Amino acid sequence: MGKNRVPFSMRIRSLRESRGLSYRKMASELKEKYGIQVSATGIQKWEEEGESNRLPTRDKISAICQMFNVSPSFLLDELFSDNQFKEKSDRIDSFIDIEMLTDDDFDALLQIKNSLIRHNHKNIVG
């Protein structure tokens, strides 16, 4: 089972796309809601993969974390994912990016989980 790095460039792209934001819309929202000046091109450069990729400044990182409701460690740590077969004890790892869900999607996921647990409990008990 191979481990794959999830660098900042991919993480920020996933967050932006999960909210349906264009580069311009994200730049505009950062300026309007958080007082952070960044161009659409600047955001695009953050998402470029490669060794020359630069990280945003601390104030921009803080605003991005607030904007997407994620912690700095989630955004900056190069987390590892393993998309191949996992043992039961590793199931929680498949939810490492759960913070990327909208509130409505998260609520829907919880409803599905609770429904499945109730269904399985009925089968075990009854």
Image (cartoon, rainbow, N blue to C red):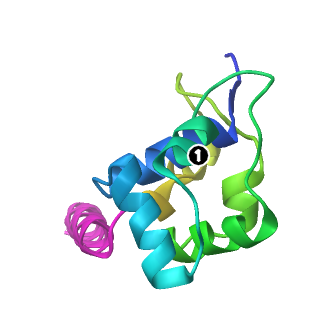
Q: Nearer the viewer, residue 35 or 94?
A: 35
Q: Nearer the viewer, residue 55 or 120?
A: 55
Q: Where's residue 117, x and y in %?
A: 30, 66
- What span is in magenta? 101-126
- In this rendering, the answer to whether 70 lies above or below 22 is below
- Amino acid type at circle 1 is Gly
Q: Where's residue 95, x and y in %?
A: 51, 53
Q: Is residue 6 left or right of residue 91?
A: right
* Residue identified by numbered label 1: 42
Say whether residue 30 is magenta: no
- In this rendering, the answer to whether 117 lies above or below 8 is below
Residue visible at 27% across and 53% down?
A: 20
Mark 1 crowd level (few <14, some 14–19, many ≥20, 10 Å Cα): some
Which image quarter holds the C terminus? bottom left
Say whether residue 114 is magenta: yes
Q: Is residue 42 left or right of residue 117?
A: right
Residue visible at 28% across and 64% down?
A: 109
Q: Is residue 54 left or right of residue 1?
A: right
Q: Where's residue 34, x and y in %?
A: 54, 81
Is residue 14 in view from this perspective? yes
Residue visible at 43% across and 80% down?
A: 32
Name the residue at the top extreme.
1
Element carrying mark 1: helix
Residue visible at 53% across and 22% down?
A: 84
State which quadrant residue 106 falls in: bottom left
Is residue 88 in view from this perspective? no
